[in-house]
Amino acid sequence: MSIDVLAQGILNGFSAAGIYILVALGLTLVLSIMNIVQLAHGEIYMIGAYSVYYMFVSLGLNFFLALAISVLLVGGFGILLERLFFRPFRGQPDRALIISIGLILILQNVVLSIAGGVPRSYLSPFTGVLHILGLSISWERLIIVVIGLSLLVVLFLFIRTTKTGQAMLAIPQDRDGAALQGININQISAVAMFFGCALAAIAGALVAPLFSISPTMGSFALMKGIAVIILGGLGSLPGAIVGGLILGLIDGIVPVLTTLYIANLMGFATIIIILLFRPQGIWGHE
Amino acid sequence: MNKRILIWILSCGVLIVFMFFIPFLFRGPYVTHVLIFTLMNIVLASSLRLINLSGQLSLAHGGMMAIGAYTSTLLIMKLGLSSWMALLLGGFFAAVIACLVSFPFTRLRGMYFAIATLFLTAIVVLTAQQWRSLTGGPLGIYNIPRPDPVIIPGILNITFASRVDFYYLVLIIMLVSLTILYAIGRSRIGLVFRGIQQSDSLAESVGINTAGFKVLAFSIGCFFPGFMGGFYSQYMSTINPDVFGFLPTLYILIYMVVGGSEKFAGPIVGAFVLTILPEVMRPLKQFQPFFFAGVLMLVIFLMPEGIVGLPKRSKKVARMLFEKRTKHA
Amino acid sequence: MKKGQNMLEIEGLTKYFGGLAAVSGLDMSVKSGEIVGLIGPNGAGKTTVFNLITGFLRPTKGRVIFESKNITAKKPHYIAEKGMVRTFQATNIFPDLTVLENIVLACHLESKIGFWETVLHTRSSRFKEGDILRRSKTILEMVGIEAMADITAGTIAHGHKKLLGIAIALAAEPKLLLLDEPLTGMNAEEVSKTMGVINRLWQSGITVLLIEHNMRAAMSLCQRIVVLNFGKKIAEGSPEEIRENKEVIQAYLGAGEYAA
């Protein structure tokens, strides 16, 4: 097993990490920070992928245009979901959990009926390979990392600088206090949902050229997302990044050494170990 | 003795006797098959409720069925154990696995616990798909033998050659399982579970080892799907990784929620209605997921206590309507 | 433990949340047979102290010694079993069980039914269930809510819920009873009734550590008062001493809630 193959594995790991981080960030925003029990997040990711597929492949739009429109559509869809299904059950996580499970069923099967179950794929809009330091990096994977990083920066700027962003962080610390200070939870929930779903949609769209898309691809994303969050710490954005990196690298490097299955197993084992010894996650509080 | 309780016991008795006669009233392989699945689902949904009593939502049932199915099948086919032994061991093995993973998992709150159990199901299914030498991979295992014959010379000679034999087997399994589950629910352990569900920290403060009891609830609850997985494999004589997993797990959850997770009868009613109904509406089978999801939403929005909560709820609604009328009178 | 000996010793108890010290270097003790009050303005860290010493939170630094045993960072159920039982300010009852069931459940420890005996439902456990029922009714009488034994706990009045909370803690047979604001939200009549209950419990031999916002009640019930502000102990002494203490007055005035 040569250095090239290992290096390729590491690079694959980074691009996998990019995807996991995108999904986990959105999930953290919605799930742990705003406490919206949106388990159908994976389905949002899936819808994002299909939306971009439809626009890019069937309608022939420019990739970035398709991406932009899809983000807006999916984000808006997320706001609608929040309004209809989650706002009535704010403060009742058990019921919201079951509602979201119902949503998973509905969304998966709607897409299944419209698009059929056959996995589809599209050629990456970024073809070609970059040769650097004797390694070959596909542009596709590089773009994922770049887009992922830029989105991270944007997200952090938003959280740190805008009032809405600050409010989002304040809410999990002290719900009643936040409400008293005039923070409008309805508004913030909608914004959080928009961003969370947008991130998921982008992740889905970016991943499509690498693997194929199918109506059930969402469960994979959800589980990876939750794994990242548990690992990195609930409610923690930096934790989502660290967790995503770790799991992404595991999924990139381990298959080079053994098999993909072992990689999944290791990811699972990592979660168990973290839960046993540091249940609040790497970056979490108690 | 309380009259109400007496009536309840008598009705249950009549119902049970009736169930023994059902194969004479409803004949045919298809009908028997549906009945068998109904009784299976009743056990699955009721055991899910036990876990739910302690405040944990489990999405591990699919994985546990797989564990039980593959374990018991391999014990029979590779080690030549009796089918009854294999069924029990399949159930116990599932319970052991549940026990082991629940130690790290009990620290997780509500939704995270649910997803962690979903993880477990996913890993189990993945293992079944990948470990070809053990599980036959994606194709699964064929020609699983029927349960060992039950022979009492002169009285019984059951060879499980016909479906009806399986019906009676699952009927007995169901009766025994429901009795166990009911007893646990009404015992002090059940009280402790409900206390933990209502206030985890309060229970801790009076000396209850909440983590330990949650592990107990989850482990016992996972025995039953393990056992039923074994039964399934001996009934269908073939298993593969697609049979268990995400969708069946969700369906079992839906049976419990729609029937009503609070009362003991809830999952029974839910499993019964939601197994029979789709069969009655056979031509519309492709809409089943939508139907299930729709019913689920309806229940959560309008009657969260489930079907068994309907009598109380309709009394409430009727009272409200009646009051409005008399006010205007 | 003999009266007069240190039942609870807290040494250097500290808790940081992120960069903020909620409790800082707290040293205090409670002797067997005492009734001690823990007071301080809102946010002083009183409930955090309770959480720290009963195992609901892990201290950043410091030790907690109960009856000469180090119980720092042990699990709450273990500490309750050792004899230190707390009540909660909020959600202090099992709302969907009846009042009597609340106590029967809380007698979990008391019956000395072990984890495994409960599981196996031995004959001895069944006999104990009869005893538990009797004892539960007695506890309800002690606290004065025996009349609502069969009512769903979530539906009773707030004042009665607080009494039930105390009864639940009693069921766990505490040697040291930690009461977290037992009088909050009560009207004058309920306050005096509850104060009577607390006093009776103390007289019957239970050591009490009490957090209370109602100054008059705390001063009247307790032999000794410890005052916290911003997570630090700022004063300790008899109620008379504390009433005169300039720092204490300043702390409350500063927080705008001085009420003698």
Image (tube, grey):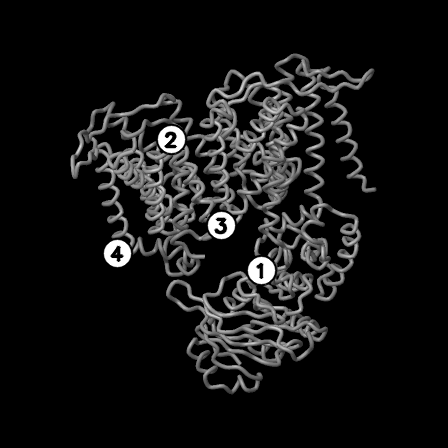
- Residues at discs 4 and 2 in contact (Cβ within 8 Å): no
Pointer 3 or 2: first along the chain? 2
> Disc 3 and disc 2: Cα gap in Å?
29 Å
Judging by the rendered image, the residue that carries numbered circle 4 is A161
The secondary structure type at the circle numbered 4 is: helix
Q: Quadrant of the N terminus of chain C?
A: bottom right
Taking the image as drawn, is residue B74 in sight? yes
Q: Using a 10 Å C-alpha cutoff, classify the residue at mark 3 as few (fewer than 14 neighbours), some (14 to 19) or many (20 or more).
A: some
**Callout 1 amino acid:** Pro
Pointer 4 or 2: first along the chain? 4
The x, y position of residue A43, in whole percent, is: 38, 34
Tell me, for residue A276, which label it has, or none: 3
Judging by the rendered image, the residue that carries numbered circle 2 is A217
The x, y position of residue C181, in whole percent, is: 57, 68
Does mark 2 fall on the same chain as mark 3? yes
Subunit of label 1: C
> Disc 1 and disc 3: Cα gap in Å?
18 Å
Q: Nearer the viewer, mark 3 or mark 2?
A: 3
Judging by the rendered image, the residue that carries numbered circle 1 is C76
> Disc 4 and disc 2: Cα gap in Å?
35 Å
In the image, residue C143 above or below residue A283 = below
